[in-house]
Amino acid sequence: MDKNNIRKATLGRLPMYLKYLESLPQEENSYISAPKIARALGLGDVQVRKDLGCVSRTGKPKLGFKTDELIESLKKHLRTNKTVNAVVVGAGKLGRALAAFEGFSQYGVEIIASFDKREVVVEDDQTMTVLPMSKFDSFCRDNNVQIGIITIDEESTQQICNQMIQAGITAIWNFTPYPLKTPEGILCKNENLALSLAHLSNQLLIINQENTHGNT
Protein backbone atom coordinates (compact mmCIF):
# COMPACT_ATOMS: atom_id res chain seq x y z
CA MET A 1 0.00 0.00 0.00
CA ASP A 2 1.15 3.50 -0.80
CA LYS A 3 2.17 5.20 2.44
CA ASN A 4 0.27 8.30 1.32
CA ASN A 5 -2.95 6.25 1.62
CA ILE A 6 -2.39 5.02 5.18
CA ARG A 7 -5.21 6.13 7.47
CA LYS A 8 -4.33 8.67 10.15
CA ALA A 9 -5.29 6.28 12.98
CA THR A 10 -3.02 3.57 11.57
CA LEU A 11 -0.14 6.01 11.11
CA GLY A 12 -0.55 7.06 14.73
CA ARG A 13 0.03 3.48 15.91
CA LEU A 14 3.13 2.77 13.80
CA PRO A 15 5.60 4.38 16.28
CA MET A 16 4.18 2.11 19.01
CA TYR A 17 4.83 -0.99 16.90
CA LEU A 18 8.34 0.19 16.06
CA LYS A 19 9.22 0.94 19.68
CA TYR A 20 8.01 -2.49 20.78
CA LEU A 21 9.87 -4.39 18.04
CA GLU A 22 13.10 -2.52 18.72
CA SER A 23 12.84 -3.45 22.42
CA LEU A 24 12.94 -7.17 21.61
CA PRO A 25 16.21 -9.17 21.48
CA GLN A 26 17.38 -9.02 17.86
CA GLU A 27 17.87 -12.57 16.62
CA GLU A 28 18.85 -13.44 13.06
CA ASN A 29 15.94 -14.64 10.88
CA SER A 30 13.47 -14.29 13.76
CA TYR A 31 9.74 -13.91 13.13
CA ILE A 32 6.97 -12.29 15.13
CA SER A 33 3.22 -12.76 14.78
CA ALA A 34 0.49 -10.16 14.81
CA PRO A 35 -1.25 -11.86 17.78
CA LYS A 36 1.95 -11.63 19.85
CA ILE A 37 2.29 -7.91 19.07
CA ALA A 38 -1.41 -7.41 19.82
CA ARG A 39 -1.12 -9.09 23.24
CA ALA A 40 1.97 -7.09 24.16
CA LEU A 41 0.36 -3.77 23.26
CA GLY A 42 -3.19 -4.50 24.37
CA LEU A 43 -4.63 -4.25 20.86
CA GLY A 44 -6.88 -6.47 18.76
CA ASP A 45 -5.38 -9.12 16.47
CA VAL A 46 -7.37 -7.95 13.44
CA GLN A 47 -6.37 -4.33 13.97
CA VAL A 48 -2.67 -5.19 14.20
CA ARG A 49 -2.85 -7.37 11.08
CA LYS A 50 -4.50 -4.57 9.11
CA ASP A 51 -2.02 -1.96 10.37
CA LEU A 52 1.04 -4.05 9.56
CA GLY A 53 -0.45 -5.10 6.23
CA CYS A 54 -0.35 -1.42 5.24
CA VAL A 55 3.42 -1.28 5.61
CA SER A 56 4.54 -4.82 4.80
CA ARG A 57 3.41 -7.65 2.52
CA THR A 58 6.02 -10.11 3.80
CA GLY A 59 3.94 -11.79 6.52
CA LYS A 60 3.82 -15.60 6.30
CA PRO A 61 1.07 -17.91 7.61
CA LYS A 62 1.91 -19.50 11.00
CA LEU A 63 5.23 -17.61 11.09
CA GLY A 64 4.24 -13.98 11.02
CA PHE A 65 6.54 -11.18 9.95
CA LYS A 66 10.31 -11.32 9.74
CA THR A 67 11.25 -8.98 12.58
CA ASP A 68 14.13 -7.09 11.00
CA GLU A 69 12.25 -6.56 7.72
CA LEU A 70 9.17 -5.32 9.58
CA ILE A 71 11.29 -2.85 11.56
CA GLU A 72 12.77 -1.47 8.33
CA SER A 73 9.32 -1.19 6.75
CA LEU A 74 8.03 0.74 9.75
CA LYS A 75 11.03 3.08 9.66
CA LYS A 76 10.51 3.66 5.95
CA HIS A 77 6.86 4.60 6.36
CA LEU A 78 7.63 6.77 9.39
CA ARG A 79 10.51 8.38 7.47
CA THR A 80 12.89 7.81 10.38
CA ASN A 81 15.57 6.90 7.84
CA LYS A 82 15.27 10.36 6.27
CA THR A 83 14.47 13.37 8.42
CA VAL A 84 12.57 16.34 6.98
CA ASN A 85 13.55 19.72 8.41
CA ALA A 86 10.85 22.14 9.58
CA VAL A 87 10.76 25.65 11.03
CA VAL A 88 8.21 27.57 13.10
CA VAL A 89 7.28 31.19 12.45
CA GLY A 90 5.83 32.74 15.59
CA ALA A 91 7.58 32.47 18.95
CA GLY A 92 4.45 32.77 21.09
CA LYS A 93 3.16 30.09 23.46
CA LEU A 94 1.91 27.79 20.71
CA GLY A 95 5.05 28.20 18.62
CA ARG A 96 7.30 27.45 21.59
CA ALA A 97 5.23 24.42 22.53
CA LEU A 98 5.47 22.98 19.01
CA ALA A 99 9.21 23.67 18.83
CA ALA A 100 9.73 21.88 22.17
CA PHE A 101 7.61 18.84 21.28
CA GLU A 102 9.84 15.81 20.71
CA GLY A 103 7.19 13.53 19.23
CA PHE A 104 7.60 14.84 15.67
CA SER A 105 10.85 12.91 15.33
CA GLN A 106 8.86 9.65 15.47
CA TYR A 107 7.42 10.64 12.09
CA GLY A 108 10.68 11.78 10.53
CA VAL A 109 10.21 15.51 11.12
CA GLU A 110 12.61 17.75 13.05
CA ILE A 111 11.88 21.38 13.92
CA ILE A 112 15.32 22.98 13.66
CA ALA A 113 14.55 26.67 14.25
CA SER A 114 11.98 29.23 15.35
CA PHE A 115 11.52 32.66 13.78
CA ASP A 116 9.85 35.83 14.98
CA LYS A 117 9.38 39.39 13.74
CA ARG A 118 11.79 40.65 16.39
CA GLU A 119 15.06 41.69 14.78
CA VAL A 120 17.26 40.26 17.50
CA VAL A 121 18.40 36.73 18.26
CA VAL A 122 16.77 35.46 21.45
CA GLU A 123 18.19 32.53 23.39
CA ASP A 124 15.34 30.41 24.72
CA ASP A 125 16.47 27.58 27.00
CA GLN A 126 13.03 25.94 26.91
CA THR A 127 12.96 25.42 23.17
CA MET A 128 15.64 26.80 20.89
CA THR A 129 17.16 30.00 19.58
CA VAL A 130 14.57 32.36 18.05
CA LEU A 131 15.90 33.97 14.88
CA PRO A 132 14.73 37.20 13.21
CA MET A 133 12.77 36.99 9.95
CA SER A 134 15.61 38.78 8.15
CA LYS A 135 17.54 35.49 8.35
CA PHE A 136 14.62 33.32 7.25
CA ASP A 137 15.29 32.90 3.53
CA SER A 138 18.98 32.10 3.79
CA PHE A 139 18.48 29.75 6.76
CA CYS A 140 15.77 27.73 5.00
CA ARG A 141 17.80 27.36 1.80
CA ASP A 142 21.03 26.51 3.64
CA ASN A 143 19.29 23.84 5.74
CA ASN A 144 16.95 22.38 3.11
CA VAL A 145 13.82 23.23 5.10
CA GLN A 146 10.75 21.63 3.52
CA ILE A 147 8.02 22.29 6.09
CA GLY A 148 6.95 25.65 7.46
CA ILE A 149 4.71 25.99 10.52
CA ILE A 150 2.85 29.29 11.03
CA THR A 151 1.61 30.14 14.53
CA ILE A 152 1.31 33.93 14.39
CA ASP A 153 -2.09 35.54 14.89
CA GLU A 154 -1.86 38.38 12.44
CA GLU A 155 -3.22 39.37 9.04
CA SER A 156 0.30 39.08 7.67
CA THR A 157 -0.12 35.29 7.55
CA GLN A 158 -0.36 35.26 3.74
CA GLN A 159 2.82 37.32 3.52
CA ILE A 160 4.61 34.78 5.73
CA CYS A 161 3.24 31.98 3.56
CA ASN A 162 4.56 33.68 0.42
CA GLN A 163 7.95 34.14 2.06
CA MET A 164 8.07 30.45 2.94
CA ILE A 165 7.35 29.46 -0.65
CA GLN A 166 10.03 31.84 -1.94
CA ALA A 167 12.50 30.21 0.47
CA GLY A 168 11.86 26.80 -1.08
CA ILE A 169 9.37 25.42 1.44
CA THR A 170 6.83 23.08 -0.18
CA ALA A 171 4.56 22.14 2.76
CA ILE A 172 2.88 24.55 5.20
CA TRP A 173 1.09 23.80 8.47
CA ASN A 174 -1.10 26.80 9.26
CA PHE A 175 -2.32 27.31 12.84
CA THR A 176 -3.74 30.80 12.21
CA PRO A 177 -7.43 31.64 11.63
CA TYR A 178 -6.57 33.09 8.22
CA PRO A 179 -6.98 30.83 5.15
CA LEU A 180 -3.97 30.74 2.86
CA LYS A 181 -3.71 30.88 -0.92
CA THR A 182 -0.98 28.62 -2.25
CA PRO A 183 0.04 27.77 -5.81
CA GLU A 184 -0.26 24.29 -7.29
CA GLY A 185 2.38 21.94 -5.92
CA ILE A 186 2.44 23.50 -2.43
CA LEU A 187 0.89 21.40 0.34
CA CYS A 188 -1.11 23.34 2.93
CA LYS A 189 -2.81 22.01 6.06
CA ASN A 190 -5.01 24.47 7.97
CA GLU A 191 -5.33 23.63 11.66
CA ASN A 192 -8.19 25.61 13.22
CA LEU A 193 -7.90 24.76 16.93
CA ALA A 194 -10.97 26.80 17.91
CA LEU A 195 -13.11 25.05 15.30
CA SER A 196 -11.88 21.62 16.41
CA LEU A 197 -12.72 22.43 20.03
CA ALA A 198 -16.15 23.77 19.02
CA HIS A 199 -16.83 20.53 17.11
CA LEU A 200 -15.80 18.45 20.13
CA SER A 201 -18.02 20.55 22.41
CA ASN A 202 -20.95 20.12 20.02
CA GLN A 203 -20.48 16.35 19.94
CA LEU A 204 -20.35 16.29 23.75
CA LEU A 205 -23.59 18.27 23.92
CA ILE A 206 -25.32 15.78 21.60
CA ILE A 207 -24.13 12.82 23.71
CA ASN A 208 -25.30 14.48 26.94
CA GLN A 209 -28.72 15.20 25.42
CA GLU A 210 -29.05 11.58 24.24
CA ASN A 211 -28.13 10.32 27.72
CA THR A 212 -30.64 12.67 29.33
CA HIS A 213 -33.46 11.52 27.05
CA GLY A 214 -32.48 7.91 27.61
CA ASN A 215 -32.85 8.28 31.37
CA THR A 216 -36.30 9.87 31.22
Image: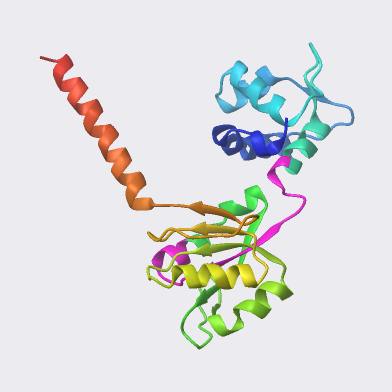
Per the image, is 82 magenta? yes
Q: Is residue 108 left or right of residue 174?
A: right
Point out the image quarter for the N terminus. Answer: top right
Identify which residue is drawn at 54% across, 80% down: 133
- What are the residue bounds of the magenta stretch? 77-97
Q: Answer yes or no: is residue 185 visible.
A: yes
Q: Is residue 44 left or right of residue 17?
A: left
**Image position, residue 98 (x, y; %):** 49, 60
Q: Does 118 appear above or below 79?
A: below
At horizontal 15% and vertical 21% (from top left) the residue drawn is: 212
Along the line of sight, the residue nearer the viewer: 54 or 159: 159
Quadrant (top left/top right/bottom left/bottom right) for the C terminus: top left
Q: Tell me which colouring the rendered structure shows.
A: rainbow
Residue at the spot 43% in from the left edge and 73% down from the top edge: 156
Q: Whole-percent x and y of residue 191?
A: 44, 52
Q: Tell which residue pokes out farthest to the right in this image.
A: 28
Q: Quadrant of residue 200?
A: top left
Name of the residue lying farthest toward the left: 216
Residue beneath the point at 73% across and 75% down: 142
Does residue 113 appear in this view? no
Q: Residue furthest top?
A: 62
Q: How many marks?
A: 0
Q: Quarter of the image holding residue 14? A: top right
Q: Of all residues shown, which one is farthest toward the bottom?
A: 120
Q: Is residue 159 left or right of residue 110?
A: left
Q: Determine if the magenta segment contains residue 182.
A: no
Where is residue 15 shown, x and y percent of the image?
A: 63, 40
